[in-house]
Image: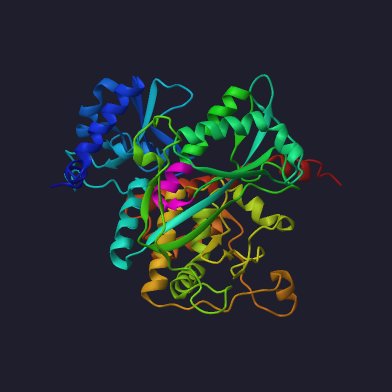
């Protein structure tokens, strides 16, 4: 069978498809968004009436391959990744991701896995390698089969709520004042974040905490960590929720990394750990009926955390954790292209006065390093911002950990000093790439991280991001005008 046929006929899927039909009928859903994730993390796809659920679950829908690259043109007016002569992908829904949209309960949402067209002469019905979400599932399954370990991830998505003019353009101001952790400023955005939390809970995010950060209108809301794929799905869902709440409140939900200089940027620290075993727990939402299938409201918990210390030194992870750190440290320059994936991302890294993670070092709770052990049992990859694609980054982190564990790598000693003071004392510490162009060069040299973007995925990513970098280099900005316009003696 082809990859597509195997996916449709996998054990237990028929029952899941039936469960979705029951939810459709129970909730009165009449329309469904079938969505996947583009190279930049955008949500793309199609809408189909719910009457056609069973047929679409079996046969899927077709959409141009170029949708995986947002169907955007490069600076030479060529479609990125795929031209108009390319065939159409087949999107097969994953019924375990079906949930109702809380802002319009007539509509449901389901993620899909993308496959090559059935009539392709080469690898018909094969996994579409430019489907970043499909790739992450494959790599997570391979990693678990090889090591018996599951990557669990928790993200800290900072973003800003900006005001806008009557014509919809940004005013250049955040809604609140840049006072970090001030409840008064948090309270000023209460109608916004309470609506976000309401919608998030209804779509399977177990919200656990939140605060006002130290940029204008900047909030961070967190949910319970989970396996790497489900957490990536929830981050994508969270972005959709914020966009909807912004429409309702006349604001802009800004995930751009650095819209303001002189204040903190929006990072998305990624906390990770590798586990053996565990069980699935369903968040039943009290006595309410679930507005989606149980799997959307499920979290994995328990098991053995292999990152926990296995010596008396509680600041050092266990053997598997140290090996994983070594793998990630080796590949930090290439990983930066995925965690800091836009031109604007490097405004954050240049503005070092705001705890920007620019040094390729690690330590225990040391925020001056690119990687830190944030608590016993987990570590935090810091050179990642709120514009990143979590599916690409998740796959790359799996590849880096795989090399560290497979080769039994050992990291250098952790740094406990402020990295800037350590440098003054003579320590030679390499910086991470400080531009998108440099990061793309480091990625091009790193076969391990590139393997997280197999075949067409790397082609699409490099094409898209290299074009972005070249557009920036070829653009005249306001800075150019301010600096050079009055150039007469």
Residue 463 visible in the picture: no
Dominant secondary structure of the magenta stretch? helix
Occupied quadrant, residue 203: top left
Asked where in the image residue 105 lies, by quadrant, the reply is: top left
- Classify 475 as above or below 272: above
Please tell me which residue lies in front, 331 or 443: 331
User: Is residue 228 part of the magenta span, yes or no?
Assistant: yes
Comparing 155 with 333, the one in front is 155
Query: Does 165 sit left or right of 280 as displayed?
Result: right
Q: Residue at x 52, y 37 (%)?
A: 239
In the rendered image, residue 172, in percent from the top left (x then y), is placed at 72, 33
Task: State whether residue 454 is above or below residue 284.
Answer: below
Vertical position of residue 311 compared to residue 458: above or below: below
> Residue 207: percent from the left, percent from the top?
53, 42
- Residue 279, image x and y in percent? 36, 54
135 with respect to 377 (left or right): left
Picture residue at 31% right of the left edge, 25% below the top: 24
Q: What stretch is highlighted in magenta?
A: 225-235
Question: Farthest left residue?
Answer: 1
């Amino acid at each position: 069978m082809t990859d597509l046929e195997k996916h449709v006929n996998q054990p237990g899927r028929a029952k899941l498809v039936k469960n979705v039909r029951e939810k459709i009928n129970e909730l009165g859903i009449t329309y469904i968004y079938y969505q996947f994730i583009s190279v930049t993390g955008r949500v793309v796809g199609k809408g189909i009436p719910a009457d056609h659920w069973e047929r679409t679950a079996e046969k899927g829908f077709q959409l141009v391959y170029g949708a995986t690259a947002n169907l955007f043109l490069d600076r030479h007016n060529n479609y990125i990744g795929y031209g108009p002569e390319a065939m159409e992908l087949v999107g097969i829904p994953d019924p375990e991701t079906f949930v109702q949209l809380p802002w319009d309960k007539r509509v449901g949402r389901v993620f899909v896995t993308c496959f090559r067209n059935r009539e392709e002469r080469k690898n018909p019905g094969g996994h579409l390698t430019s489907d970043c979400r499909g790739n992450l599932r494959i790599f997570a399954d391979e990693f678990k089969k090889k090591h018996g370990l599951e990557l669990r991830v928790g993200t800290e998505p900072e973003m800003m709520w900006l005001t806008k003019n009557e014509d919809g353009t940004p005013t250049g101001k955040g809604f609140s004042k840049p006072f970090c952790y001030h409840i008064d400023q948090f309270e000023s955005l209460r109608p916004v974040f309470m609506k976000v939390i309401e919608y998030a809970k209804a779509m399977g995010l177990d919200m656990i905490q939140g605060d006002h950060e130290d940029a204008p209108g900047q909030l961070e809301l967190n949910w319970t960590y989970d396996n790497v794929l489900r957490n990536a799905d929830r981050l994508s869902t969270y972005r959709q929720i914020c966009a909807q709440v912004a429409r309702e409140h006349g604001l802009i939900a800004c995930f751009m990394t650095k819209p303001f200089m002189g204040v903190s940027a929006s990072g998305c620290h990624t906390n990770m750990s590798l586990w053996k075993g565990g069980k699935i727990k369903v968040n039943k939402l009290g006595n309410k009926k679930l507005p989606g299938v149980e799997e959307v409201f499920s979290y994995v918990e328990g098991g053995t955390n292999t990152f926990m210390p296995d010596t008396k030194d509680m600041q050092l992870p266990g053997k598997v954790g140290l090996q994983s750190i070594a793998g990630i440290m080796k590949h930090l320059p290439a990983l930066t292209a995925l965690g800091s994936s836009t031109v604007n991302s490097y405004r954050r890294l240049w503005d070092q006065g705001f705890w920007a993670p620019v040094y390729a070092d690690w330590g225990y709770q040391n925020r001056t390093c690119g990687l830190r052990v944030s608590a016993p049992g987990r570590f935090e990859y810091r050179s990642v911002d709120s514009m990143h694609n979590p599916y690409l980054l998740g796959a790359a982190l799996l590849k880096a950990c795989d090399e560290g564990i497979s080769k039994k790598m050992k990291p250098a000693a952790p740094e406990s000093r402020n990295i800037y003071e350590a440098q003054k004392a003579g320590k030679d510490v390499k910086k991470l790439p400080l531009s998108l162009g440099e990061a793309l060069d480091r990625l091009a040299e790193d076969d391990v991280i590139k393997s997280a973007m197999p075949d067409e995925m790397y082609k699409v990513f490099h094409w898209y991001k290299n074009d972005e970098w070249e557009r920036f280099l070829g653009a005249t900005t306001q800075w150019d005008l301010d600096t050079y316009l009055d150039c007469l003696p």
